[in-house]
Image (cartoon, grey):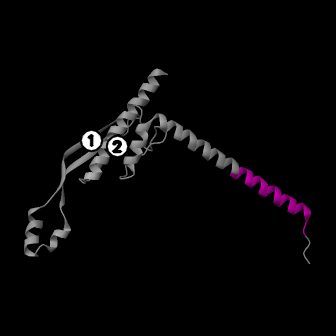
Amino acid sequence: MFKRDPEKAAQREAQRAEKRQQREERAAQRQAEKEALAEWRSTHPAERALNTACMLRAWPASKFGETAQGPIRGGHAEFVDAGAHKAWTATRLAGSVLTGGASLAAGRKNKGAAVINVTFGNGAVQTYNVTPENATLRAANQYVTAFNALAGQLANEAGQQ
């Protein structure tokens, strides 16, 4: 019924084998990059702390000391907390009295402000607003501490070389 062309079958098999080999090479390359990154992060623990804080907010994450905005080496970060907190407002308290406490479910209102000012090694400056929730404020403080520690460690390594 159907006649298979042995030459075409051999070509297709050769193409499949080539693609399989390319996939295996890419997988081996990704694994090597992953191991190199894990080794680098073991000697730079501040990067792991920085990236852990990034999981909570959209702050720039780092890979080998580089972020999308620029390098960390030569950079500096500061956390400015201008009394950021959650508080009950007079209107929410008055509303709860009128509604018999039903409006208390609305919760407290954000008060004050907090920001992270980040200067990267290439001179780029970025400001990030921080919501006054305890977990976010802790993460922001952790991010700034880790950023400055990593910047200092990378500067020391560059100075030694």
Q: Which residue is mark 1?
A: 79
Residue furthest out toward the top: 160
Name which residue type carries label 2. Answer: Tyr
Residue furthest out toward the bottom: 1
Could you tell me how far apart the alpha carbons at marks 2 and 1 are, in whole angstroms?
9 Å
Label 2: which secondary element: helix
Rendered view: 89 above or below 153: below
Q: Quadrant of the N terminus?
A: bottom right
Q: Which residue is mark 2?
A: 143
- The residue lying toward the viewer, choosing from 90 and 138, is 138
Name which residue type carries label 1. Answer: Phe
The stretch of residues the image draws in magenta is: 4-23
- Classify residue 116 as left or right of residue 99: right
Asked if the residue at tag 1 contacts the one at tag 2, i.e. Cβ–Cβ closer than 8 Å, the answer is yes
- The residue lying toward the viewer, choosing from 7 and 123, is 7
User: How far across and down, in percent of the image, does residue 101 sit?
Assistant: 12, 72
User: How far across and down, in percent of the image, does residue 42 sit?
Assistant: 48, 37
Residue at position x 7%, y 72% from top? 97
Residue 29 colored magenta? Answer: no
